[in-house]
Amino acid sequence: MKILSIRPAPPGSGTLAHADIDVGGLRIFDVVIRRAADGSLRAFPSERGRKATVSFGIEFAQSITRAAEPAIGGSSRDAAAA
């Protein structure tokens, strides 16, 4: 997995950043990175309207937050998708 770009979210939202990732040639854009109540980082797919554009399994979401962590700081321990 490779982080192609990461952009900080505007202040005041629960979102920390938006990331574009590459997984073996599959590119996923605008992945949402948030901090959970327990302090861990969480990765969520972007949405169009109220529908997700893709779905992440827990292990995949954890690999996203581990890859994004150096760019946003913080802990990705026990990171998961909702």
Image (tube, helix red, strand yellow):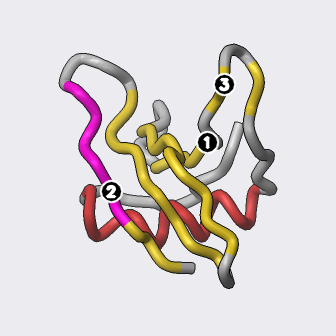
Above or below, comparing residue 18 to residue 63 in the picture: above
Residue located at (32% from left, 20% from top): 13
Q: Nearer the viewer, mark 2 or mark 1?
A: 2
Residue 56, x across and y down, in percent: 76, 52
**What's the CA distance linking mark 3 and mark 1?**
13 Å
Relative horizontal placement of residue 46, taking residue 56 as reference (left or right): left
Q: Return the residue at label 1.
A: 44
Quarter of the image containing the C terminus? Answer: top right
Question: Can you tell which quarter of the image residue 17 is in?
Answer: top left
Name the front one of labels 3 and 1.
3
What residue is shown at x 46% (from left), y 49% (from top)? 41
Q: Nearer the viewer, residue 3 or 58?
A: 3
The kind of secondary structure element at disc 1 is strand
Q: Answer with the quarter of the image where residue 16 lies.
A: top left
Instruction: Nearest to the eye among marks 2 and 3: give it.
Output: 3
Magenta segment, principal secondary structure? strand
In the image shown, does 2 or 36 lie closer to the viewer? 2
For this view, does 29 lie left or right of residue 50? left
Which residue in the structure is indicated by mark 3? 48
Q: CA–CA distance between discs 2 and 3?
A: 19 Å
Instruction: Please give left or right for residue 17 compared with residue 27 in the image.
Output: left
Secondary structure type for disc 3:
strand
Q: Residues within 10 Å of mark 2 (few under 14, many from 20)?
A: some
Specify the segment rendered in magenta. 5-10
Sequence order check: which comes first, mark 2 or mark 1?
2
Whether residue 22 is situated above or below residue 38 in the rendered picture: below
Q: Residue at x 66, y 80 (%)?
A: 25
Q: Does the magenta stretch include residue 41?
A: no
